[in-house]
Amino acid sequence: MLAPLSQSSGSQQGFTLRPLAPTDEAWLRELYASTRSTEMAAVPWPDAAKRSFLDQQFALQRKHFEQHYSEASFLAILAPETHSPIGRYYVLESGPEHLVVDIALFPRWQNQGIGSTLIRQSQTRAADSGAAMGLHVLKHNPSALRLYQRLGFVVVSDEGMHWRMRWRPSTASQAG
């Protein structure tokens, strides 16, 4: 299990993690929809059709993650003081290459260093066990790509809509 976010300064202070619970489905659906809001704004469908599509996509993504990464930690990111969910962090921390399965924050909480802190903590655990880390990033998400590159990840393959990226402990000095 991951420890509470522990960075001593900035907005990250006081954020905690907990395993997902069955009661989390409603806010997880909203979080998923928020990750697709820009894309869906350009689609000329009625709101009800967009919502139905997003709900179906959420269910398919969730099923995929549960089937292919059943050993991962599926975690809610909780805000300080209110302990309300503000994002999710799915990470598989075993084997020779740990994997960031998914990370998402509601828009209001993005660009505050929360994701960087989580990934750095996972990098520390990977390095402590002699493991590398991997992740996938959508090609049309340049801000996420820049974040991962700042944290020392490098593109290792082109997988269609995604870049496959890897971080090795020897590249830790590049993170930051």
Image (cartoon, helix red, strand yellow):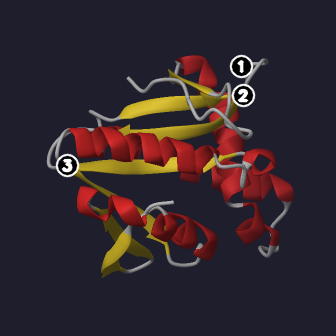
Which label number is shown at residue 83? Answer: 1
Eyeballing the image, is 158 above or below 94?
A: below
| Measured Cα–Cα span from mark 2 to mark 1 | 5 Å
In-front residue for pair 98/138:
98
Specify few, some or many for label 2: CA neighbours under 10 Å numbering under 14, 14-19, or 20 or more.
Answer: some
According to the picture, the residue beneath numbered tag 3 turns out to be: 131
Specify few, some or many for label 1: CA neighbours under 10 Å numbering under 14, 14-19, or 20 or more.
Answer: some
Q: Position of residue 130 (x, y in %)?
A: 16, 46
What amino acid is labelled 2 in the image?
A: Ala
Indicate the secondary structure of the residue bearing disc 2.
loop
Q: Position of residue 149 (x, y in %)?
A: 47, 70
Q: Position of residue 94 (x, y in %)?
A: 21, 38
Indicate the secondary structure of the residue bearing disc 3.
loop
- Foreground tag (3 vs 2): 3
Indicate the secondary structure of the residue bearing disc 1.
loop
Which quadrant of the structure image shows residue 174? bottom left
* 55 sits left or right of 169 in the view: right
Q: Earlier in the sequence, mark 3 or mark 1?
A: 1
Q: Position of residue 51 (x, y in %)?
A: 74, 51
In-front residue for pair 90/55:
90
| Measured Cα–Cα span from mark 3 to mark 2 | 30 Å
Q: Earlier in the sequence, mark 3 or mark 2?
A: 2
Mark 2 touches mark 1? (CB < 8 Å): yes
Which label number is shown at residue 28? Answer: none
What amino acid is labelled 3 in the image?
A: Ala
* 36 sits left or right of 158 in the view: right
What amino acid is labelled 1 in the image?
A: His
Residue 88 visible at all: yes
Residue at screen point 31% across, 64% down: 171
Eyeballing the image, is 34 above or below 148?
A: above
According to the picture, the residue beneath numbered tag 2 turns out to be: 79
